[in-house]
Structures are given as C-alpha cells and as structure tokens.
Amino acid sequence: MNILVTGGAGYIGSHTCVALLEAGYSVIVADNLCNSKVETIDKVKQITKKDILFYQIDVTEEDAVDKIFSNHDINGVIHFAGLKAVGESIEKPLTYYYNNLVSTMVLAKACQKHNVKRLVFSSSATVYGDNIVPFVETMNLLPTTNPYGETKAMSERILTDIAKANPAFSVSLLRYFNPVGAHESGLIGEAPNGIPNNLMPYVTQVAKGKREKLSVFGNDYPTVDGTGVRDYIHVVDLAVGHVAALDNITEGVHVYNLGTGQGTSVLELIQAFEDANSVEVSYEVVNRRPGDIASCYADASKAERELGWTAKRDILAMCRDAWRFEKNYEE
Ligand code: NAD
Ligand code: UD1
C-alpha cells in the first residue's frame, strides 16, 4: 500500500512516516520544506532502514500534486502539510487561509480524479474552542481565536461536505491534543525556528541554557494550581494513531480525538521534566497569554473503541524523549 504523506518532513509527519514504514506501508512524502529540513527524511530512513520517495513540492500547486498521483498508485493520503503558528496566522491571515485551505482542496481534487478513496486529515483540538472539558467528538465546535484554528475547522467542513457527496470517499479527521516528545532514537523531534511558541520546546531550550527562563502564562486559571492544563501526547503515540486510523478507515467521515485523556498543568509539566531528566528549569509567572483557555483535554474513548488505539507513553517518557532530542540537536 502506497501512502502519500504531505508535510512528511515535519515534526508529526516524520514520526508518522516511521510508524507507517514499520507497519509495512510504502511512503511517498510531498513537502516544500518551508518549516523542515530534507535531512529529516534521511533520519527516517536511518531509523527504519527503509526507503522513502521524496518530492519537494508545494501541495497548493495542482499540477505538481497531480504528477505524483499520476506517477504512483496511491492507496491513501495523510495530509499534514500546513502552517501552524497561531500568532503568525493573526499577522498573515491570507497566507494561512491560502496555504491550509487550498492544499486541502487540491488534495481532495486529486483523490477524486485518481480514485483514491482514503484521506486522513490533521486537525486540532483548537476547533473545540472554550467548550467544557473533556472534549468529546460530538460537541458543537466553537469559534477559535485565530485564523490558524479557523483553517482547521474550515478544512474539516470542506472534507465533510466532499465525503457526503461522494459516499465511497473515506475521511478521517484527527483532532490532535498537544503533541510533544520525540522518537526514542533522538534522531527526529521538534525543532522550531526562532523563539518557540509552545511549552515543551521552550522548556527544553531553557534546560539546555539556550533561553534564560520560561514565562509561565498565568497562574490564576480555575485549574489544579492555577496554570493552564493540557493533554500532552507523545508524538510516537500520535504517529501510531495515524496508522490505526488508516487501517480502520471506513466510508464516510469519522472524527477522532487523539489525546491521552489526562490533563497536566504547566507547573506539573515543569516538575515532570525536572524529575525525568535531573535538570532544572527556571521560570517566572507572567500575565496570561491572550487567546489561551484554562483547560483542554480529550475524551479519548472513541479512538479506543473504534480504532483500538490508546496512547501508551506517559508524561515522564515525553519529557525524557524531548530532552534527548534537544541535547542531540544542532542547528
Ligand atoms: P510542521 O511544521 O513540523 O510540519 C508541517 C510540514 O508541512 C512542514 O514540513 C512544512 O514544510 C510542510 N508544509 C507546509 N505547507 C506546505 C505546502 N503548502 N506544501 C508542502 N509542504 C508544506 O508541523 P507539525 O507540528 O508536524 O504539524 C503537522 C500538522 O498537524 C499541521 O497541519 C498542523 O497544523 C497539525 N497540528 C499540529 C499540532 C502541533 O501541536 N504540532 C497540533 C494540532 C494540529
Ligand atoms: C497552542 C495554540 C493552539 C495549537 C497548539 C498546538 C495558542 C493560543 N494556541 O495551544 O492553537 O493547536 O498550540 O500547536 O497559541 N505556556 C506557558 N509558557 C510558554 C508556552 C506555553 O506557560 O512559553 C502555557 C500555555 O499558556 C498553555 C500551555 O503552556 O497553558 C501549553 O501551551 P502551548 O504549548 O502553546 O499549547 P496550547 O496553548 O494548547
């Protein structure tokens, strides 16, 4: 089975390529490398000792995408390619709407033209907005606070309508909670450009001495210790979740939360990181970050019931693996 993985050189995509190759799938990656490096593809080959076909293309370009579908007998698509920086999406909304929506439509069109019946899409827990936790797939979606989040909600709607009109088309919408950690080899992981927006990469850079201290955004939320609570999920568990989604895909549209179901506060995560790695993480509490919600964690039971998938790695493993990658990583 040939799987086209868009954005396969990126953080979640590269780990998913490993999981797919280990499960016996053949992988074709399409990535324009706007937020990743081609060396990551070599690292995936090194980990799995298997080959990958790589196309450096922009998936908003219809002709380039069409060529891949013409050259290969593709059995399924996993669409990771997208821009994901929340703050940047507020500054450059058109760039975000164009990249994230056009890529989704170009791929859906190529699937229809070439009779490819399976598509798995990277969505986000951000589409739940400020619903009451735990988030369940049946909840009404609430507006997000930024264009990035809106591109996820809109892509979900576009793919849902396409699948409704084409009953043989199977779409799996995967709502990720907070992916962290790295492959246990330490060869691939999350390497954001510039100042990290997300908590775990900031923590690893403080531990490495690259940044002085972490700013904890608010300690007056209605949570266990006042700091924000999130459902951190090991990126390898998330990657395995994609294989489960592909293996169990059925006609129509199916939505799955991919999370652990467990909430961890910012202070709990700092403590876990220090315990797991015997390093200190300096921090200070500052004002809340605009647009943040107090708590976000999954009801992860549907993926267990229907896909037979649950997250296996705990917060200590996430912290250990994130730190191993950061220590090894050279820019
Ligand atoms: P990433 O930036 O590491 O990976 C995305 C990859 O897509 C990059 O390699 C980038 O070069 C590529 N890309 C972007 N636009 C492209 C285009 N037009 N054509 C070809 N390649 C393109 O991000 P990630 O964390 O691996 O996220 C993967 C997907 O999961 C994204 O769609 C993201 O929005 C979604 N997601 C991520 C998170 C998270 O916390 N990391 C959470 C929820 C959802
Ligand atoms: C952020 C995005 C969300 C996106 C998700 C995964 C915002 C408002 N939301 O969510 O749309 O889907 O990343 O990419 O940006 N924190 C600190 N200090 C930091 C960084 C974070 O205290 O330097 C706190 C946050 O306030 C939050 C928690 O750590 O409580 C997790 O933050 P983060 O990793 O940015 O993820 P989300 O806020 O869940």
Image (tube, grey):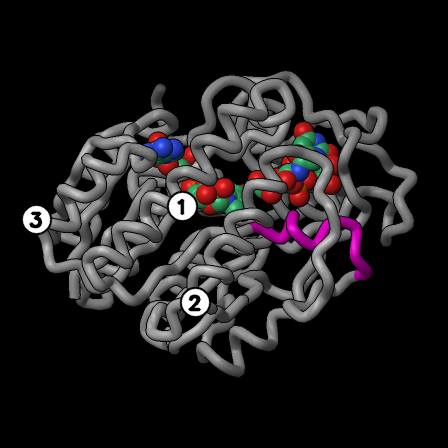
Sequence-wise first label, 2 or 3: 3
Instruction: State which mark lies toward you, 2 or 3.
Output: 2
Q: Which residue is mark 3?
A: 71
Q: Residue furthest bottom?
A: 305
Q: Give x and y (percent) for residue 42.
A: 18, 38
What's the amino acid at mark 1?
Thr
Sequence-wise first label, 1 or 2: 1
Residue placed most toward the observer, 229 or 325: 229
Element assignment for label 3: helix
* Residue pictured at 81% horizontal, 46% vertical: 294
Q: State which quadrant residue 187 falls in.
A: top left
Label 3 beta carbon within 8 A of ligand 1: no
* Residue pictured at 45% horizontal, 77% vertical: 307
Which segment did they paint magenta? 124-132
Check whether the beta carbons of the residues at disc 1 and disc 2 lie within 8 A of each other: no
Q: Give x and y (percent) for residue 220.
A: 92, 39
Give the CA separation, mark 1 to mark 2: 16 Å
* Residue pictured at 91% horizontal, 49% vertical: 222
Q: Which residue is mark 2?
A: 165
Dot 3, crowdedness within 10 Å: few (<14), some or many (≥20)? few
How many numbered callouts? 3
Give the CA separation, mark 2 to mark 3: 27 Å
Dot 1, crowdedness within 10 Å: few (<14), some or many (≥20)? many
Q: Is residue 129 magenta?
A: yes
Q: Which residue is mark 1?
A: 104
What's the amino acid at mark 3?
Asn
Image quarter for ligand 1 equals top left
Sequence-wise first label, 1 or 3: 3
